Amino acid sequence: MDGHDFALWEKRVDALMVLCGAKGFFTVDGLRRALEDMGEDAFEKHSYYERWIAAVNQNLIEGGVYSLEELGTRMEEIAARGPTYGEAQNG
Amino acid sequence: MPHDHPDHAHDHGLSPSGHPYRADNDGPLTYWQRMEIAVRELLIEKAKITPAEITAQIEAMDARSPANGAAVVARAWCDPAFKARFLADAGAASREMGFDIGPLNLIAVENTEAVHNLIVCTLCSCYPRNLLGLPPDWYKTRQYRSRAVREPRAVLREFGVDLPDSTRIRVHDSTADMRYIVLPARPAGTDKMTEAELASLVSRDAMIGTGLARTP
Amino acid sequence: MAERVRVRAMMPPGHVRAPSYLRGKEGVIERPLGAFHNPEQLAYGLPAEKKPLYRVRFRMDELWGKAAENPGDTLDAELYDHWLERL
């Protein structure tokens, strides 16, 4: 038994983390710093990949890859696509 | 102690293939899923990443599993010269067997009658993922991460590994750039087994140190 | 004879890779690991100089005192040179 399979969105978070790291957009230490800065209660409130996508996003914002306004606008658009991940996952 | 085999089956039933249904694609869209979609789309639109790269990376991670580590362990049990190379530089020895482990810096630690090794990352969730795939959920829990360094014997007992006081326990906290893999002790009564048969005795937990190699 | 070291007990805020449970504790250098970019600079997107990294071995009774399950059991961790004092 090797545990559960991860959800597609979680695998995508993992892939984004590895690829952005390999391309030099941030370092694993930058991700860890962002995770630690979320505070202790983030560990209780959010799942592993929820915390990691937050850390990836934090580092990309800090690195100027896109702006908060672009992110916020896009997240609103995505919410309008449909009520499930399956419907919203591709723009 | 936390094993990562929650009873999905009792919550959601099983698919026709006998696997638990995955709820992610048809459940309500969460804030964090929206963030993942947005980050991915923005990276693609700004030509920082291609969809093909994302697909290839997911496939590469999916292809990594504890079976890769088990193959390396079985080789080390069968070939003393390989074992020496594995203990000197576990990353190089794994690459020599054809495993694409990227830039992983890997140290192998050997279990014997006198010494039992246990791997943990107290600061986050460092794990030899490029060889063994993604870590089990329990490895990432605060409970395992805090207790493995303070009371490793109690943790091991909860995993079913009860060691005598005469066996020295060495805990390895992956605090920086190295990752660790345990070379489990070869079980007795396996002299006639082939390398492939031996590999089937090596569980993921045996390579973390929370388990032992199975006895045939 | 293994070289004895003590982990510096400083507690600056921010991202460091020296776990707090090891600060102020004494151990021996198990092996040098080479030089790696300083995570305390990498974490903030800064150019990072290379620092020597060591594996340091601690006895459980040094870490946990009488609460140690077995005083002779050990713990190894990776620590950067600038976190170690030679004894």
Image (cartoon, coloured by chain):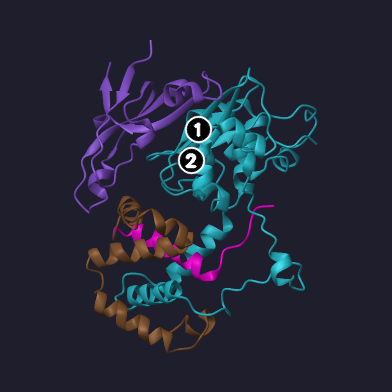
Chain colours: A brown, B cyan, C purple
Q: Which residues are magenta?
A: A1-24
Closer to the camera in the image, B196 or B108: B108
Q: Quadrant of residue B187?
A: top right
Q: Given the image, on which type of amino acid does mark 2 rest? A: Ser
Q: Residue B158: which numbered mark, if any?
A: none
Q: Given the image, on which type of amino acid does mark 1 rest? A: Arg
Instruction: Please state the horizontal and vertical placement of residue B210, each as a whole percent of the image.
Output: 62, 38
Instruction: Please state the horizontal and vertical placement of residue B196, each as a whole percent of the image.
Output: 72, 42
Q: Is residue C52 above or below residue B177?
A: above
- Examine the structure image and report whether residue A19 is included in the region drawn in magenta: yes
Instruction: Read off the residue under disc 1.
Output: B150
Q: Residues within 10 Å of mark 1 (few under 14, many from 20)?
A: some
- In the image: residue B156, left or right of residue A63: right
- Report how far apart the C-alphas of labels 1 and 2 lie in the structure: 7 Å
Instruction: Read off the residue under disc 2.
Output: B146
Q: Chain under label 2?
A: B
Q: Could you tell me which residue is drawn at 68 percent across and 33 percent down? A: B161
Q: Could you tell me which residue is drawn at 50 percent across and 32 percent down? A: B150
